[in-house]
Amino acid sequence: MGTGHSHGPAPEHAGGRYRTRLAVAFALTAAFFVVELSVGLVSGSLALVSDAGHMAADVVALGASLVATGIATRPDKSGRRTYGSYRAEVFASGLTVLIMLGVGLYVLVEGISRIGQAPAVASGPMLVVGFLGLAVNVVALVLLRGGSKESLNVRGAYVEVIADAAGSVGVMVAGALIIVTGQPVWDVVAAVAIAVFVAFRAIVLGRQVVAVLGQHAPEGIDPEAVAGSLGGIDGVAQVHDVHLWALTSGMNVATAHLVAAPQADHHEVLDRARDVLRDRFGIAHATVQVEPADHHGCQDLTW
């Protein structure tokens, strides 16, 4: 029976490549949060306060992302973290989800409580701050867009900024409607709409986080297709115990047991399996166990 694993050089952590951009986005967002919250409190705008609350969530999420990328790229000196600390970025994404849900719930409750008694709101500051917030968000989106396609951690921060950009647009629309109609209720409507959108985006990101922590098969990889491709290798009689999961963004892992046909060269089977997993499915780190046809040890497994 032969066992082997294939991997290239230690992969560069996807989130780590975007730490500088995360840092710039964090600084811009933190600075504008102070401005928006101050104006929201002075003007009496719930939409501004709600968007500032979401901006605060951005600040925490971006800060957590920065910390997570630092932890993930730090070498393990304990010898016990056999996969390193790459999952740190996934936990940071989970924190982002909780913050977004909390902000969304608070704004929704506060908005409902104001229905029928919407206080006077200074619409001019709403328009100005909404425009400035949108500008800050656009800069942050440009900085994080590339990393959002490679890192779940950066994607979490990117989703946060998208939601906040939508909030800034909502603030501007509400300010314009208040000027046109003279009805401050539009401030409440914008706040509730922002809350619902934030919660929806949080749920989408949360499902991705659960998929990674639950060790589901990586998105875009069909376990049956992997098993079928391995079974089609010359010299493979049977495939079983195929497991696929994502350690973190861009780091997919696999294990599989291959039963070799009689007279098959186990080394060739192992090399072909490695090539299939790497070239067809993008799985560079795989542990493959090649078993002779008369081996029955795996039948003793109880789970």
Image (tube, rainbow, N blue to C red):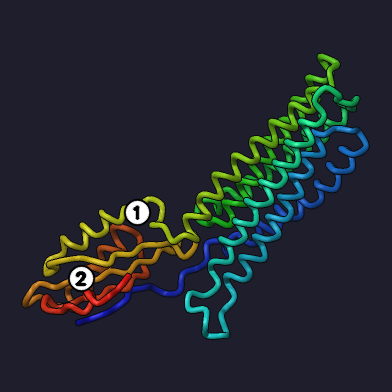
Residue sitting farthest toward the left: 263
**Type of the residue with mark 1:** Ile
| Mark 2 neighbour density, 10 Å: few (under 14) some (14–19) many (20 or more) | many
Quarter containing the C terminus: bottom left
Q: Is 16 situated above or below 10?
A: above
116 or 139, which is in the foreground?
116
Query: Which label sits on residue 77?
Result: none
Label 2 sits on a secondary structure element that is strand
| Mark 1 neighbour density, 10 Å: few (under 14) some (14–19) many (20 or more) | some
Give coordinates of residue 155: x percent, y percent: 57, 51
Which residue is label 1 attached to? 221
Which residue is label 2 attached to? 258
Relative side of 156 to 51, left or right: left
Relative side of 172 to 148, left or right: right
**Quarter-of-image position of residue 279:** bottom left
Label 1 sits on a secondary structure element that is loop
Residue sitting farthest toward the bottom: 78
**Quarter-of-image position of residue 288:** bottom left
Q: Is 58 situated above or below 289?
A: above
Q: Residue at x 16, y 72 (%)?
A: 259
What whole-number distance in Å separates the C-alpha atoms at marks 1 and 2? 19 Å
